[in-house]
């Protein structure tokens, strides 16, 4: 029997997704035998939104505290001091989203974990997701060949696939992140639009799949 699909629509540069990541990982751990988990990239920081973080996203300097207070996650000193404070690091969703597309071609079952790793790299460790070297370190724990990964990361094929995913997300009517959908044979459910605490999400999923 085909498992219901839980779709997590996110962006690697979405601060609220960073806050939501522990919730989703716990959901995955609790329901991995009952649900098929899939992660879709939204492409939040594209086009004229791309640029130095201090210019294109100055609000993060105070907004990150709201995320911490609401979710309990912590933004790392490396991000706060080395990225946010100088404000010169270029923010663009394209490359990390392509990285997730490449990763899913290797290990789709670990997409939730890798999506978390991408965000942790930025918002905790202050890493630059526009450089190839960052990804060599991120894929190493999964046993993926780093050189092959980087080659695919910079290929037109995976860039095209990623932009197709952006289009799909847009056609689904998803414009904010995080968004969580549950697709069953009977019906599709919108479980979360924006940050949601674990327990109500867990209870809703439990109720739907046991109905």
Image (spheres, rainbow, N blue to C red):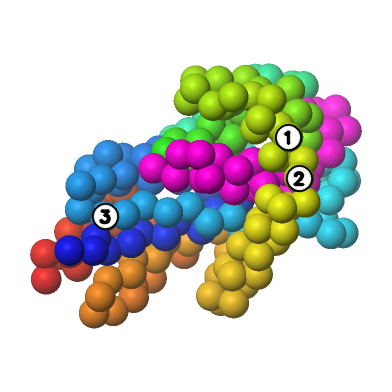
> Where is mark 2, residue-wise?
155
Q: Nearer the viewer, mark 2 or mark 3?
A: 2
Asked whether residue 103 is drawn in magenta, I would say yes
Single out the residue that lies furthest toward the left: 210
Using the numbered discs, state the Cα–Cα distance from disc 2 to disc 1 in whole angstroms: 6 Å
Q: Which residue lies at the image location 11% right of the left edge and 71% below the top edge?
A: 211
Examine the rendered structure and indicate whether residue 176 appears above or below residue 186.
above
Marks 3, 1: nearer the viewer: 1
How far across and down, in percent of the image, does residue 23 sit? 37, 43
Find out whether the residues at labels 2 and 1 contact each other: C-beta distance under 8 Å. Answer: yes
The percent coordinates of residue 194 (x first, y second) are: 49, 59
Callout 1: 10 Å neighbours few (<14), some, many (20+)?
few
User: Closer to the camera, 82 or 21?
Assistant: 21
Q: Which residue is mark 1?
A: 151
**N-term-proximal mark, 3 vs 1:** 3
Q: Which residue is mark 3?
A: 35
Is residue 87 on the magenta stretch? yes
Horizontal side, residue 181 vs residue 139: left or right: left
- Point out the stretch of residues depicted in magenta: 83-109
Residue 118 in sight from this viewpoint: yes
Task: Please state if 192 lies on the left or on the right of 66 as rendered.
Answer: left
Q: What percent of the width, then of the height, locates residue 54?
A: 84, 40
């Amino acid at each position: 029997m085909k498992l219901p699909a839980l779709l997590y629509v996110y962006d690697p540069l979405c601060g609220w997704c960073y806050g939501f990541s522990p919730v989703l990982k716990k959901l995955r751990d609790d329901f991995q035998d009952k649900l098929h988990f899939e992660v879709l990239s939204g492409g939040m920081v594209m086009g004229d939104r791309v640029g130095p973080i201090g210019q294109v996203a100055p609000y993060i300097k105070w907004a990150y505290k709201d995320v911490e207070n609401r979710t309990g996650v912590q933004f790392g000193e490396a991000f706060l001091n080395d990225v946010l404070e100088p404000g010169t690091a270029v923010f663009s969703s394209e490359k990390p989203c392509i990285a997730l597309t490449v990763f899913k071609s290797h290990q789709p079952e670990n997409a939730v974990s890798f999506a978390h790793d991408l965000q942790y790299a930025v918002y905790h460790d202050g890493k630059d997701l526009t450089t190839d070297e960052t990804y060599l370190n991120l894929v190493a724990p999964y046993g993926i060949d780093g050189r092959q990964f980087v080659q695919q990361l910079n290929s037109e094929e995976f860039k095209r696939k990623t932009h197709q995913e952006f289009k799909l997300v847009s056609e689904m009517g998803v414009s904010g992140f995080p968004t969580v959908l549950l697709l069953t044979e009977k019906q599709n459910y919108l479980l979360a639009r924006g940050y949601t605490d674990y327990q109500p999400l867990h209870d809703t999923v439990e109720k739907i799949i046991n109905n």
